[in-house]
Image (cartoon, grey):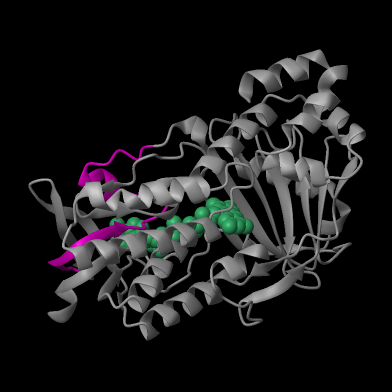
């Protein structure tokens, strides 16, 4: 117990970001304590559980059928009038059983030496001058301090720890999506290994509806919409499900809801003795809302920087800002471009979306564009629609 109150790295939040920090820092020999206010790792899930195949190698893991439960080999995008853009059969990835995935990550972290304290909420960070030196926690009614050389806040979209340390991570409402999802059974799925996405201003304002299959007749069926939408995400999703005969005999087995920070990529994520990772640092793809992999990618960089700082005895923000630089070069600057593309997509009318769907032969171009590349192909496409061309120019 005393041992846990004095650690090299204190990780606040045992989601994918925090657990990956612990695995990486443990590998490098650091003593890590993780606190999470929940009583069970991975529960409740607030996620559609999709993970692109390319991430496994990048994160140094193999898909395990215990948690990578359903293979995806196709993606289908539908415009408001129902026209399908075929993204292609080479889209490989998995739908996870995220509870099992996070328990796998937690077990790996423990094997690398981390100690996890559940039902332990971090109340605020402790500072000595400008230096963050730990956090005050409440473990089932017992309040005490945990001292650490570096504190890494991985406390998700509702993060309070960065602000308690003096780092403003507040997101504008316009940079937040509202997500709502049913995991449903007994759906009459067509292509059982295809992700499906449905667009339209009246279907999902500023967002889309998804079907992510995770079994023969089971899928995560959800919606993400702009946080400033007139009606709730549930309202739009229920309305859409009611019209689709594939759901006639289906029913939910789980409800998942949560905010998704889709904008506001931060340039600075450190203070003296303090770093922030994952949703808490808005490290989410603004286009698809995915953050499971990005939180882990950032977690690896943060852990490596923190361990190096400890070894060098320099816990200053100046040293820790190496994390900012590496992450922005490796991922953040690309995500800034994706945010611009998203802003362009947000102003499209249903008619514009139908036009794009009609003109595009295959969706590879769309995918490329959505990730901030290949603007030239679209510029050529929009010559026929000067309005679209102008607004693309304005955003990009
Ligand atoms: C509806 C929906 C669908 C989504 N679908 C996908 C998808 O298909 N693919 C994808 O990649 N991403 C998806 N995401 C996003 C993804 O879930 C997040 O980006 C990801 O969970 C971020 O991981 P994280 O570790 O930063 O935070 P989290 O997973 O949120 O973990 C934060 C942890 O911190 C703990 N915590 C918070 N405050 C404290 C405190 N004060 N003290 C102690 N513990 C604390 C919480 O209990 C939690 O365990 C979706 C999100 C939503 C809402």
Residue at far front of view: 312
Locate residue 388 relative to residue 120 in the image: left or right: right
Was residue 167 drawn as part of the magenta stretch in this picture? Answer: yes
Closer to the camera in the image, 208 or 33: 33
The residue at the far left in this view is 129
**Where's residue 202, x and y in %?**
74, 32
Q: Residue at x 79, y 53 (%)?
A: 196
Q: Residue at x 88, y 54 (%)?
A: 245
Q: Position of residue 372 (x, y in %)?
A: 65, 38
Q: Is residue 280 above or below residue 313?
A: above
Viewer-closest of 206 and 131: 131
42 in the magenta segment: no
**Stretch of the chain drawn in magenta:** 141-170
Q: Is residue 157 visible?
A: no
Q: Is residue 184 visible?
A: yes
The residue sitting at 22% across, 61% down in the picture is 150
**Image quadrant containing the C terminus:** top right
Where does the image place residue 54, in percent across and percent down from the top left? 66, 63
Classify residue 116 by image quadrant.
bottom left
Quick one: quadrant of the N terminus?
bottom left
State left or right for residue 109 relative to residue 311.
Answer: right
Relative depth, front residue between 202 and 175:
175
Residue at point 76% right, 48% down? 197
Q: Position of residue 394 (x, y in %)?
A: 64, 18
Q: Quadrant of residue 65?
A: bottom right
Residue 293: image quadrant is bottom right
């Amino acid at each position: 117990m005393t041992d846990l109150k004095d650690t090299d790295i204190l990780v606040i939040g045992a989601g994918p970001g925090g657990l990956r920090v612990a695995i990486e820092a443990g590998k490098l020999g650091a003593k890590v304590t993780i606190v999470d206010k929940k009583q069970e790792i991975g529960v409740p899930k607030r996620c559609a559980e999709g993970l692109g195949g390319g991430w496994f190698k990048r994160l140094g893991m193999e898909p395990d059928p215990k948690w990578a439960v359903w293979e995806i080999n196709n993606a289908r995008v539908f415009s408001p009038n129902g026209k399908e853009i075929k993204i292609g059969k080479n889209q490989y990835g998995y739908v996870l059983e995220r509870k099992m995935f996070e328990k796998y990550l937690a077990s790996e972290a423990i094997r690398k030496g981390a100690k996890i304290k559940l039902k332990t909420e971090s109340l605020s960070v402790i500072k000595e001058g400008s230096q963050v030196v730990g956090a005050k926690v409440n473990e089932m009614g017992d309040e005490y301090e945990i001292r650490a050389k570096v504190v890494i806040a991985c406390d998700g979209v509702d993060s309070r720890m960065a602000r308690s340390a003096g780092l403003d991570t507040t997101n504008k409402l316009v940079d937040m999506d509202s997500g709502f999802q049913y995991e449903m059974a007994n759906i009459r799925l067509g292509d059982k290994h295809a992700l499906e996405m449905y667009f339209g201003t009246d279907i999902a304002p500023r967002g889309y509806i998804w079907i992510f299959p995770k079994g023969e007749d089971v899928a995560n069926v959800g919606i993400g919409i702009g946080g400033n939408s007139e009606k709730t995400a549930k309202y739009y999703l229920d309305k859409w499900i009611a019209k689709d005969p594939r759901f006639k005999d289906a029913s939910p087995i789980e409800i998942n809801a949560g905010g998704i920070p889709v904008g506001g990529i931060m340039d600075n994520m450190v203070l003296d003795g303090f770093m922030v990772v994952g949703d808490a640092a808005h490290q989410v793809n603004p286009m698809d809302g995915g953050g499971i992999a990005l939180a882990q990618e950032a977690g690896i960089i943060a852990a490596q920087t923190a361990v190096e700082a400890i070894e060098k005895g320099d816990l200053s923000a100046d040293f820790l800002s190496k994390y900012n630089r590496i992450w922005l070069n490796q991922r953040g600057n690309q995500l800034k471009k994706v945010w611009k593309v998203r802003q362009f997509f947000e102003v499209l009318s249903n008619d514009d979306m139908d036009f794009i769907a009609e003109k595009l032969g295959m969706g590879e171009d769309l995918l490329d564009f959505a990730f901030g590349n290949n603007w030239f192909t679209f510029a050529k496409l929009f010559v026929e629609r000067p309005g679209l061309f102008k607004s693309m120019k304005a955003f990009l």
